[in-house]
Amino acid sequence: MLILMAWRNIWRNKRRSLITSFSVALGVFLAVTFTASGDYGYTNIINTSAAMGYGHVTIEPKGYNNAPSLDKVIPKADLIRSRVIDADGVVSASVKISGQAMFATASRSIGGAFLAVYPDQEGAAENIFIRSIIEGELFDGPDGIGVVIGQKMAEKLDLKIGKKLIYTMTDINGEIVGQIARVTGIYKTGVDDVDSSMVILPIDRVRKTLGYEEGDATMISIFSDDSRRSLSIRDSLRDSIDGSSLDILTWQETQADIAGMITVDRTMNYLSQLLFGVLIAAGILNTMLMSVLEQKREFGVMLAVGLPPWRLFLLVVVESLIIGVIGLILGIIITTPWYIYMSRTGIDLGGLMEEGTDVGGVLLDTVMKFRLYKESAIAILAGVFSLTILAGLYPAYKAGRIPPVESIKEI
Amino acid sequence: MGDNVIVLEGVSKVYSQGKIDVKAVNNLSLEIERGEFAVLCGPSGSGKTTVLNMIGGLDIPTSGRIILEWKELSTLSGTELAKIRRDRIGFVFQAYNLVPVLTAFENAEFVLALQNVPKDERREKVMAILEEVGLKGLEDRRPDELSGGQQQRVAIARAIVSEPAIILADEPTANVDSVTAESLITLMEELNKEKGITFLFSTHDQRVISRGRRIIRLRDGALDLE
């Protein structure tokens, strides 16, 4: 009977209840918009950042992250990779050597960085440079003389596909060593700093140049289908791999600046949502207080005929909750087409953003899209329910404290 | 104490109005026996409603004792008082005071639902009571679809359906026309005679007073004449 009464009470003032429910629906719409754009945007940045070399989880020589150096080596990295690849949550892993080098042609030279890779371990999904190749292709084997350079470097060094490039680096003994390479591909990520400095090299050729043993590398990049699993993958790898000479780090540790930016942005996002939530809760509170005031007399009667105050309290909370549920349903109805459109098509913000806008060297996607993680959807649901219940508590408390003898007298 | 439903012993009630204390009830002692059809009467401000409210556990005496079926009300907690009101007291108010979102049936059913009486039993009892008070066929109507007299009949049905020890009726005929008032008094009289339900009225309606089998007159919060 309590739920029936609560339901009927709500419709005593249809307009007010509907306006309040629509404000809840608006809250759902905004919460989904903010959260889903965040979930998509953060995931995109994390995955792009991972595809720039480190992966979601990285195995490195001890201390490499703080002081990278080519004399810090993972011995038998290929062997470790073969064990890692089957770990739970891992979709791919690749062995790499990363470091600094000078790149020169006959007339010009430029400082930069390199990633030495196995071509067969690098897919377009896990390597942004490969998927950004705009001319030519990735070199064939790990021991060839092929090289992939960025478009800006190609411009600066006046290089084209098939042209020669000399790279020099410091080997494991501290000696300056060099190799001749031939450009097989040119990529363009859109971030000038990256496109003018990062070069992709074949790993075996680099090993020989640096004096590494077969199978040595400076990092193993591990990719998951879900960046949120990084921590669990790292922990399970720490348990399964002898880590005395290795660091196993998540993307938050290897890309601390990006992780920090995401944390700050996400916190601001949550604060904005909280503010909207408080405003919506104030609307519900107002509606419920008005409702309690209007029903004061009958609440007094119900208390007089024996309704315990806690059940009256519950009645008002249930009324508030029903408004929340109606708002939630309306919110889902309003938000679903918007979410489908935004998750499939999105809005191109290219006109509002400067070309090549990046965060910590990671190119920002100009198309705003949505992706809502299950836990985010649950958080929104829980938030709406919590706010509606919280907003109903004070009016419910007031209702439970109505003195029957006075309210009955009021006509 | 005999078969007293209600016993008042030296009950006083003082209200503070600013700096002035107003004595609404002054050292009132009274006994109501089971099956009585008693009327509290007196001029406005004589303390009738205050006495009824205190007997119903809606108001607390400043001093004195009120005993309902061997239980002293002042010793009971709020929850216990709510339970007493639910199980042992029926209220009929001047302004009907039905729950507007509930139908006649649901209003009459309300107290039984609070008592967790099974649904089938509730339905049987409520339908019987509504027929008894002359509302057969009007069960599904909401209060705003009923006349004043019909609403008061629903209120009476709600009051008697749980078979309480006493019905406290505060000016039950004040808001209805004379014909309806007569029929309501007759209805309550019949319920008293046939079912032995104890009624205590607060009224200054001569029609009610004339039908009362015991008249208790109050003046300035004290017993004036019986």
Image (cartoon, rainbow, N blue to C red):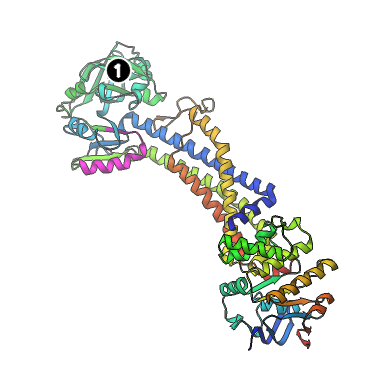
Magenta-colored span: A221-240
Q: Position of residue A19 (x, y in %)?
A: 65, 46
Spot the residue most to the top.
A162
Q: Tell me if residue A276 can be seen.
A: yes
Does A162 sit left or right of B88 as displayed? left
Residue A181, compared with residue A284, is above or below; it is: above
**Occupied quadrant, residue A151:** top left
Provide the chain ID for the residue under circle 1: A
Q: Tell me if residue A177 can be seen.
A: no
Q: Residue at x 59, y 46 (%)?
A: A326
Does A64 sit left or right of A320 as displayed? left
Spot the residue most to the left.
A213
Q: Is residue A233 magenta?
A: yes
Q: Residue at x 70, y 74 (%)?
A: B194
Q: Residue at x 30, y 42 (%)?
A: A232
Q: Position of residue A306 (x, y in %)?
A: 61, 69
**Magenta highlight: main SS:** helix
Q: Which residue is mark 1?
A: A138
**Occupied quadrant, residue A79:** top left
Does A137 sit left or right of A214 as displayed? right
What's the amino acid at mark 1?
Leu
At label 1, counting other C-alpha atoms closer than 10 Å, the crowd grade (few under 14, some 14-19, many 20 or more) is many
| Viewer-closest of A194 and A374 | A374
Q: Position of residue A368 (x, y in %)?
A: 50, 30
| Viewer-closest of B198 and A6 | B198
